[in-house]
Image (cartoon, rainbow, N blue to C red):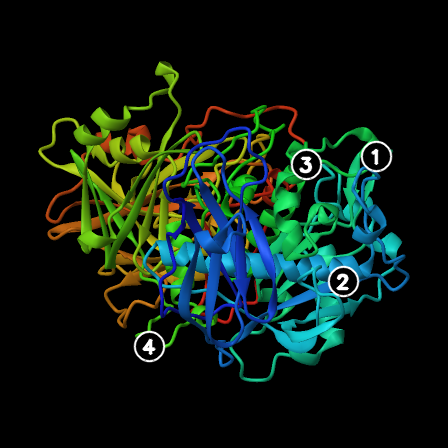
Amino acid sequence: MSFPVLDNLVDGEVVYQRFILVTGCITAFSPDLSASTLHIAVDTPSFPTQTFPVSSENGAWKALVHLQPGPQNITFSFNGDSDVAITVSNISYLPLLQLPPLHLAILVARDSPQWMDCPPEKAASPSHNDLGAAIKKIRTWAYMCQAYTAEEMRRSGFGRRSFRLDEEWAPDTLSISDEQPVFRVTAKVHIVKSDCTTAQIRDPNLAQQNPNARNKGIPSSSLDFYGLYTYFHQAIEKYEGPFQVFRGEEDGPVIAGLILDSHYDPVQDLITGHAALGGTGGKLGKVHLGMFGSHTHWAWPRFIEEITPCLLDATRVTPRSLVGNDNGECGTFWEACCIGQGAALHEVGHAFGLPHQPSGIMSRGYVEWNRSFVAKESYCVRRGSPAHLSVPLETSNHWHLADKLHLASHPMFALPGDVPRTRDKAPISSQPMRDRIVVKSENGIAHLCWMRDGKVVQEHDIRSEELLEVVLLLNDVRSELGQGEKKSGIGKLGLTITACDGAQKTIADFWEYATEALVVLPGCDFVVKKKSAVSGGPEGKWGVWRWAVLLTKLNKDGKVIRADKLQIQCGLWFDGVYVHYEDGTQDVAGAKRHAGGNTKQLGGGTTWLNLGKDDEIQSLRIKAGEYGFVNEVQFITKEDAGAVRKGMEELVPDDGEKIIGFYGKHQHDNGYCPTLEFGILTIPQGTELPKDAYEMPALRNTDGGSGVSPSDVNGGGAWGQYEEYEDRDVDEDEDEDDGEMEE
């Protein structure tokens, strides 16, 4: 006889979320590919019975199960037959009311019509597009995200760990089966009125997907207005209530925010009133906001009973639907639901301090959002694939391990009995050598992710090995993953390293990094070594400017002279350094020219460092990651002392070596040319560079090495050239004025 079997729940478990995502299968299951009504029925106290589909191919099923506070029994029955049922006993739901919650908010224009886009093909269309529907949908979505995150954390060994929702005793809307309003403790949804009109919110110049928009909400060192993100923040500040930040508080509330008045304009083929952005405080205050439009809200479920139908609805989105096809990935109703719900969680991830990742929710893995909740799949327009009667256990819809490591130490994700954890992240160091690269973290290395052309090709979860140091032998990497030379047609090989504390470091071009680690000096028995900090930011569409600058040079008489002062330029990020020599000349440690050919002047504020005859640069302390760039460089001399500030990586010469110069690379663009890599050049103490070395291209700053100088460059700074800037570390050690915001 066939019985339900549970994969992830046993008698006596304690759960800390209102809903739990349970997976299982049917024992002794005989495939019946023609069956369309196989289901699992779930009976819990104080909530209507729910049913979820069973795969007719392998008997797998997934269920979102409601819990009430305290102990309870849950019964799972196959096709609702009590004779083939299993009861899980004494499951206790313990709300962690002491933790700060995630708040839900809907931004409404002051003259809002209070309706959302909805295709006429949608069943009961009018009941899906008003403010009441918006409240029901965001509430259901929030509980789906909470349960999904808890299950993801459990699967990686972190326990059922998730965020708490701001809840209240109120009429519950989560079940359509409630015959009359039933009061329960349920998620509170704040209606936040804006001073802006609907026309202001729908201004095409604020639309994130408008290529000609003047302000999409992207951070800039020169702007104080962040488009729709600013509008939402202003409304939150005026709303006050639970969103107030009290003096002395380090962090403000975390808010998932929906823009009600998003609208698809078919004439412009543009989704207006929408910007998918998430950020952690900064210029706009200490509120952490993950914001998204309502343009896919029509596809979201209002009730638990609608989750399965919404995630299986294969109705095609056509021009007649009069709704936006976000990113071209909303070809069916169920795909629109995945993109909308998953992208919203992605932005909340940014509000929790998560950067973009190579895979998962913080990439675009949420295109398979449905597979976490339903055991089968409908026809997919995006892939052009037929319906599947079962779905794989592993999907692209996951929290990346780096995200889980970060969230495990987040105060909103704490569990009873947790050992106190620091949220400070130790920098990851990497040192190229002749035949290897050595990677180190004082908190241990957790994960290695190899990528080619931005796609994951190999991953290694090495937490169990408890390694503080990982040695990557170049021959081993070459044999397993290839050299990745352009002439072979194989793209660049990249590596993202994740430490056990959630810190990350990305090497965009592994082989460039490995093979340029040394500069061979002809006729010498020693080499110039390189050691750097890499930000992991994007190279931009015009490539990079590579450079090297020495702390000595040959004057016009061929005599070696030294640098006597450094002019350090730093603003929102670290721009570079002017190296001044004794003869009054100077060189620049940074980009010399824009991509259009104009001379690049280093920006930001100026700090001078005078170098006496006996002064030597002993080390560099570098902070990299915020905005995807190098943010700060400290030049440490003999007179300097003190501990390395948290969040900074220190570059120290190997024993018996001395610093003779700097090298790095900058984004080569027509604007800011921010720093992507900055490092030191060293040779053995007691040796000097031969004079021929001063003419070596590898030790000079000449043409940047990019060979790209387009003559018809359009204007626009670095922020205008891309809209996703990845792998930013979370800045938690300073009270910066500059916020962190991502798409």
Q: Which of labels 1 and 4 is toward the front?
A: 4
Q: Which of labels 4 and 2 is toward the front?
A: 4
Q: With respect to residue 421, does 323 lie above or below?
A: above
Disc 4 on helix, strand or loop? loop
Q: Which of labels 2 and 1 is toward the front?
A: 2
Q: Which of labels 3 and 2 is toward the front?
A: 2
| Mark 3 surroundings: few (<14), some (14-19) or many (≥20) residues within 10 A | few
Residue type at tag 1:
Gln
Mark drawn on residue 107: 2
Left or right: residue 148 versus residue 198 is: left
Disc 3 on helix, strand or loop? loop
Mark drawn on residue 417: 4
Q: Position of residue 720 (x, y in %)?
A: 64, 42
Task: Compare residues 353 and 170 and report the one nearer the observer.
Answer: 170
Circle 1 is placed at which residue position?
268
Disc 1 on helix, strand or loop? loop
